[in-house]
Amino acid sequence: MKTPVTLTLNGAERAAFADPGQNLLEFLRRGVGDLSPKYGCGQGTCGACTVRMNGQTVLSCLVLAEMAQGATIETAAGLATPAMHPLQTAFMDHFAAQCGYCTPGMLVSAKALLDRNATPTRDEVIEAISGNLCRCTGYEPIIAAILSVAQGRIRA
Amino acid sequence: MTDMVGGNMFEMRKEFFRDERDDNLNEVGKPTRRQDIPGHVTGRSPFFDDHLFDGLLHMRCVRSPHHHARLRRIDTAEAEKMPGVVRILQGRDVPRNLNTLLSLLDFGIDDEPLLSDTKVAYKGEPVAAVIAQTEAQARAAVQKVRVEWDPLPHVLDVEEAIKPGAPVVLDIYPNNKFVYHGKYDHQKLRFGDVEAAFRGADHIVEGRYQMSPIEQAPIETCGAIAAPEQNDRYVCYTSTQGLFFSLGTASKVLTMPSSRLHFIGGTVGGGFGGKVDSIHEPLAILGAMLTGRAVKYAWDREEEMQVGAPRGAERWYLKDGVMRDGRIVARKFTGYFDSGAYTRLSSYAIIKGVGHLPGPYTIPNVYADVYCVYTNRTPATAMRGFGITAVDFAIETHMDKVADVVGMNPIDLRILNAYRDGDMKAHRRIAKNCALIECAQVVAQKAGVTLSPALAAAASTRDGGGARAALPAFTATDEGGRVSGFKSTNYAKKGGRQPDMPGVPAYQSPRTAPPTPNPSPQGGGEPTPPPATPVRTGAMRFSSLSGFRRR
Amino acid sequence: MTTLETYATLAEAARAMAGGQSAAAYLGGGTIVMREVNAGTAPSRIVRTTDPVLSEIRLSGDTVSIGAGVTMAQVLAHRDLGFLHPVARLIGGPQVRNMGTVGGNLFAAHPYGDFAVALIALGARAHLVGQGARGVEDLMRDRSRPPLVAAVEFARPRQGTFGFLKVSRVKPKGVSVLSIAALIPRDGGRCRGVRVAYGAMGPAPMRGAGAERALEGQMFDAATIARAATQAAEGLDPPTDALATAWYRREVAGVHLRRLLERMERTP
């Protein structure tokens, strides 16, 4: 028996029906049609499914879709407005994505960091992205990209 | 000249090989944006799963919990009644249920079912595929499929697997060893006479090296979505790294001309070699064929780690004959590749690896016996440095050991033995564009290691060739590991034993088979077949695969 | 088919778990139960509550009470729980800390449960719904049918008496090879009322009797610390798993215990 779920996604009201036991990741991807958060593990280890829910980063594969009723959700697809967000530009300039699969989750975690701390240290950047695994870049380009925004080289 | 690119130091040492090069570089060393990165940072890059289909069905496999077992019976009665279940596939539903990837290149005997129906040879091997309306329903139905297994003894170690009396993992080949060139149960490399050289050496240095299987672990798991398309075609979105491999395999296994298959790939969420011999597409397409709907078949993380093919484990025994002054005069390799339960790409990995021996060094006597061994482990595949990584680890660790024995600094030892332009290599090609010496010198400088003056001044472009370009006067050969019953010119067919496949037509490449006759437009009477396409004859050049060239 | 049942109070949720037609799983932060839901191995009934009492953090006098629904992030945000920040910070990554709860960590399977390790060392008691209170250490002995926990309560440790160390192969977010929590109150320089707890050194977080025996009543100095290190693994039967062998855990337990104790000795 499906459950109707209405939420705000990247500023717009969206609604769809959630299957029993469906997680928020699958609901966003197949129910609502936002394909930016990705499936990597279904266990909460890789972070590819990271979205922001009511201002906090969460692993959408570990959230029951029904529990997102009325929530405010932000995903990587909402970053460009439509101009690229400085983080997106920084990622492109610093080779902070190769296969691109971890990138949406990584950007959500990075934005959450800069929204609460505009001048993080390198260690704070590392902690902020520690819940997002990347198998391609070795993380240094990602850290450099985030720090470049924080240090104002790319205006936020 | 040092640059920051992507947060990493990038140093160009243009003083080397200056006269061989035009330094007017337009792209190298410049931070050109990846053409796909705007898609990555907006979440719009279309990975295989980023396509929406109405009424998408989900496929999950029933898998063996045993390393090795006979499959007595599969009972799907209860599972078929589970909510949302549309269809359950078994081996009998697969048009041609036996394959090996490299048979597409005429290198290998079909050995692996898409869905096993008599025996399983590794833990996780699929025996049935449940298709249901949701993933949760497919998972629940998989748990209700009843399989009766007769567990068999299993073997998980390469040297145990080739002992007489070991459990037979793959019965096409003798003693769990792939047959090379139709002649030997291993790949040979013979160059000079290592035994004579050992007798004259000042030191003998031996070592045993082991690399475990390594899982590529991309963040995106393997998968495909297939759907019926117009004009009796099927579209297939896939995570594969080898689109044409996948297309050819699907065409063969489903006995469907590739013109009826529309494969879309190219956006891979990390492959590292683990998505090269992708096997998802045939099952997904078969599901679409038999249900008439879009079907997704993707691994979850546990399957990716357990069932997904890793870089195969390898074990290497090295024996060097070394002179007092550090020159390595003989090197003998015995290598064992753990192919796991099926061949896949491992047979080719060995050829690649053997071409690499004895490493970037000029050694006048080289001997290698390298085995592709079947065990009851997960079948192996490529991963960064396919066929090379583990043997390089063995070679370089061994070099350090040799340096220790002769009392030389390990970088000096490498420069001393490094190949130079013009040297004859063990697989009978002349070395060119060598640069190991220069790399080693820069490494020594950066690591603060003082090299001996002569070696600090060495160069790849000097002192090579001449006597070093000659083939050895005598090469000791042998018939060890000789097998019979295999044709020497073509791996895909066997003299004598054909794989037992009742009712399945022998595979014929569309280029050699006569085309199917078209029905006569007037109807009635025997249609006259058009003239058969002439069979291609003459030169076949697969020198990199089989080690010989015919012109 | 998974169904979600939401109750306004913890008591109602407990009744629903005990009395339903079929087995139910309690959903706290979701970081554990949802893995099973995704894998299709969870019970079909998922029970949760919106009872606000679960999110309360109360400090009154010397007693600290933390609701079972308090997340690691909420612990980190609470200024008066500074002594627990080194523990909460090393659990999961930022996303897991936003979701994972104190109650959930109590019953997390090996090798998880680092917050439970800290609670054992603090001598915490768990207030169970409809069952009174039990020591957390006691609760760890049989985790097969976990009761519903409302809150955990313990005496606020004196400054510098509580320490925590986590050993993981990947940093900063990595699962424990082992973790150690130590409560070392001092009375004129002597250790009194020592409690040492280990994570990932057994089937569940547990006390370290060997280490405690070596410390109790002794002066907190280098000699005592050295002795405690040699007795660190006494009575423990650590597991072999994908992260480390039993042998390795036994070998390094003393090394890490010594590092923790030396750190605590240096910073009074």
Image (cartoon, rainbow, N blue to C red):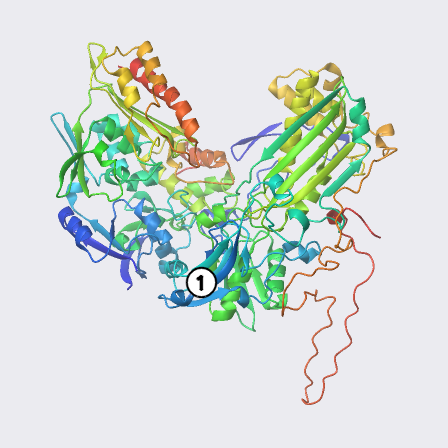
Residue drawn at x 18%, y 48% as measured from the top left: C50
Q: What amino acid is labelled 1 in the image?
A: Val
Residue at (75% x, 58% y) in the render: B495
Which chain does the residue under circle 1 lie in? B
Measured from the top left, where is residue B325 in percent x and y? 76, 17
Q: Is residue C198 visible?
A: yes
Percent coordinates x, y for residue B232 in the rendering: 56, 73
The quadrant the N terminus of chain A occupies is bottom left
Residue A10 seen in the figure: no
The one of B4 and B106 positioned closer to us in this rendering:
B106
The image quarter containing residue B355 is top right
Q: Point out residue A67 in the picture as x, y percentages from the top left corner.
A: 26, 52
Q: Toward the viewer: B437 or B198?
A: B198
Mark 1 burial class by Cα count in 10 Å: few <14, some 14-19, many 20+: many
Residue that badge 1 annotates:
B130
Residue occupying image coordinates x 30% and y 10%: C221
